[in-house]
Amino acid sequence: MCGILFKHHRVLMALAVVPLVICLIGCEVSTSARIHSGPTISLSGSGRLASFRIYSPSPGRRIATPFDEKSLAWRVQPIGGYFEGELVQGLDIEYGKTPRAYVQIVPATGTASALQKGQVYWFFAETTDAPGASGFFYFDGSTATEIDVPDLCQSAFVGDVKPLKCGTQEPYVEPQDLGLFVRQHRLH
């Protein structure tokens, strides 16, 4: 009797493990990003990079507004098309240096403008087959520091995008002391 129960238990365990293994093999892993000097953004996850963008602050501001096309400083996308990007796992993107198998879209000619000291930029790694990654970083002239910018939302995702205080239609007011703000909202 004990031998029958043991065999029955092994069958049940096998039946439980097989769906778990199938799920783990086929499940997507969201894209994550880490920022290093340069700045270089190191990506990981299970998706493919469909587009990579960096937005700079608009004139008169010190913090970039996400998706503000007028402030798009640099954009690259796969030469083969949107769905033909490289796997993000282990992919490093250095600002202004077009990765292999990608083409620079913005700026249309020449090189990307130098990042300005004392500004907050926003990056967006758009991916296929898994959620992408985005985030803010403060550039001190040589080092990029990942930060959170709470309460900054945008009025739209395309077109005339304005910075708004999240949950309202009020304009987003930038902090007076950006250095203190960066120290208080540093992520790593």
Image (tube, rainbow, N blue to C red):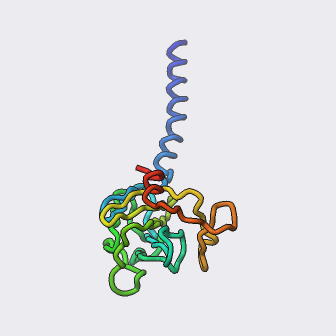
In the image, is residue 113 above or below residue 152? below
User: Residue 169: x and y, percent?
Assistant: 69, 67
Residue placed most toward the observer, 98 or 100: 98
Determine whether, in the image, residue 37 is placed left or right of residue 125. left
User: Residue 125: x and y, percent?
Assistant: 46, 65
User: Residue 175: x and y, percent?
Assistant: 52, 61
Quadrant in which the N terminus is drawn? top right
Q: Is residue 147 visible?
A: no
In the image, is residue 93 above or below residue 59? above
The residue at 47%/60% (across/down) is 177
The residue at 67%/67% (across/down) is 170
Q: Is residue 124 visible?
A: yes
Residue placed most toward the observer, 33 or 64: 64
Determine whether, in the image, residue 166 is placed left or right of residue 11. right
Residue placed most toward the observer, 10 or 164: 164
User: Residue 78: x and y, percent?
Assistant: 40, 74
Quarter of the image for residue 44 reads bottom left
Determine whether, in the image, residue 171 is placed left or right of residue 126. right
Query: Residue at the top extreme?
Result: 1
Determine whether, in the image, residue 101 is placed left or right of residue 53. left
Query: Residue at the front extreme?
Result: 176
The total number of labels drawn is 0
The residue at 37%/58% (across/down) is 35
Residue placed most toward the observer, 33 or 186: 186
Quarter of the image for residue 40 reads bottom left
